Amino acid sequence: MTKLAFEEATDYILKACEKRFSDVVVHASRSQAKQIKFVNSEISAGRIWMDQSVSVFVAKGKRVATTSILDLERKTVDGTIAKLEKFIAKSEPNAEYGGIAEGHFAYKEVQNAFDPRIPKLTGDELAGFVEEGIGAALAHGAKRASGSLEITHSREMMKTSGGAHGTQKGTSAIFSIRAFAEKDASGHKLSCVRSMQHFRPGETGQKAGEFAKESLNPVPGEAGKFDILFDPMAIACLLQHVGDSASIFSVEAGFSFLENRLNKRVASDIVTIFDEGTLAGGMGSTKFDAEGVRAQKTTLIRFGILRNYLHNTSTAKRYKVNTTGNAGIIAPHPWNIVLDNGNYDSQEMIQQTKHGLYVTNLWYTRFQNYKTGEFSTIPRDAIFRVENGRVVGAVKGIRISEKMSHLLMGIEAISQRREQILGWEVETPVKCGHVLARHVNVTKSTEKAGA
C-alpha cells in the first residue's frame, strides 16, 4: 500500500477535497515529546512518544463536517474523504456558517517559538534539569518534591481552499515542581518556556521549596471578606476564563459573564488584558488560526472597559466586524491571555495589605453560573495570612466563592514582573503578574489537597 509522506499529505488531501466540497481546511501536525516524572525527590519514570495527525474541515454550502486522519495510507485517506462526502450530504445545514477566510496571508514570525537545542536534549540532560530543580527545593526548606519535566518539538502545515498556506515549527519545555516541608506545607511553581534561554529549573525549585517551608504549621482559615494577593499561578487560573468568556461563541451560547458588556466597564481601571496570538515565546503563540488567518494581538479589556470579542470569519460577518484571527475548527478561542503589567513588586503589595491572604495556587475552579460569572475555587499549597503589611502565618481549609465581575472590579494593584503559566488548571496560556484584589469572599472548604 502507498503511504503519503507527511509533507505531501496536506496537498493531496486538499486537492481531493476541493473536488467534492466548497470550503476545505487541512492542518497537518507532527510532534515528539519527552517526559520525566519524579516522586519523593526520585526520578520514577521517563517516556518518549510521537503524535501525527491531519485534521480536515470541509463545507458544502451550509453543511459542515470535520474529522482527523491518523493513518496516511492513501487508501485510508481516500476512504475517509469518501465517508466525509456521504456524511455531509446527510447533515443538517448550519445557518450561521459564513465560510472561511479568502486570500493569501503574510505571516509574522513568532519570536522565540523554536529553539533547535530542545529536540537535541538527551535523557541525561533532562535528568540533570530535574535534579537541579529538586536540589534547589530541598536546599530551601523542602523535605521532598514531586512533579515532571516535559519537552516537545512540533511541525505544522496548513492549507485551505481559500488560498491560505502556512507552515511553522515550535518547541516547548514545562517544568512543574511541588515541594513539601510537611503534608500540609507545600509549594508549587512552574517554568513554561519555548526557548532554553528562559528555562530556570533551579529558580523554580527554589521558590517551591521556600513556599513549602514558609507554610509550615497552617491553621484553619476563617470565612469573611479578605484582600487577596494572588500569585501568578493562582490568578492565571481565573484570568483564563476572561479569555474563554470573550469568545463570541461563549457569548452566544450563554456561557459568558461578558455578554452584553461590550464598551462597558467590567474591571477596575488599572486592568488591561490582551489576547496576543504572536506573543514572543508565548506557549500558545501561532502564525495562523484554523482558517489560515494571520494571528494578531486583540485588546479584550482596556483600562477596565471591554473592547472586543474574539471572532472567526463566520461570526465576524454576522456582527459586521473583522475576524480577530482566533478561529478554531468549532469556535473562536484565545491563544495567550496577557495581563498588562503594573508598577509594584510583590513585597510592596503585601505591605499594602492590612487584613488579607496571599494565595499561591488554586485548583478545582468551578462555575456555578457562567452567565453571571459565579464561581468557587480552592486555594492549594501555600496560603499565608497577612496582617498590617506582614505575613503572620499560614492557613488552610478555605474556599474562594465570588463573581468574576466583583473580582475584576476589585483589582487594586498589579506587579511589574510577570510569569507565563500553562498547566493542569490553566489550559489557555496566561502571562501575568501578582494581583491584589480587595474584599474577596472567602468561605470554609471541606476539600483536602492531596499530597
Image (cartoon, helix red, strand yellow):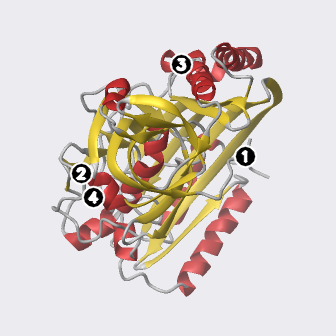
Residue matched to label 1 = 450
Do callouts 4 and 1 mark residues in contact (Cβ within 8 Å)?
no
Query: How would you rate the neighbour count of disc 1 (Cα within 10 Å): few for under 14, some for 14-19, many for 20 or more?
Result: few
The residue depicted at 72 percent of the width and 39 percent of the height is 50
Q: Which element carries disc 4, helix, strand or loop? A: loop
Do callouts 1 and 3 mark residues in contact (Cβ within 8 Å)?
no
Mark 1–mark 3 distance (CA, rounded to whole Å): 31 Å
**Residue type highlighted by circle 3:** Met
**Residue type highlighted by circle 2:** Ile
Residue 370 rendering spot, x and y as whole percentages: 42, 69
229, 126: nearer the viewer = 229
The residue depicted at 63 percent of the width and 16 percent of the height is 140
Do callouts 2 and 4 mark residues in contact (Cβ within 8 Å)?
no
**Residue type highlighted by circle 4:** Thr
Residue 109 rendering spot, x and y as whole percentages: 36, 31
Residue matched to label 4 = 323
Q: Quadrant of residue 350?
A: top left
Residue matched to label 3 = 196
The residue depicted at 76 percent of the width and 15 percent of the height is 124
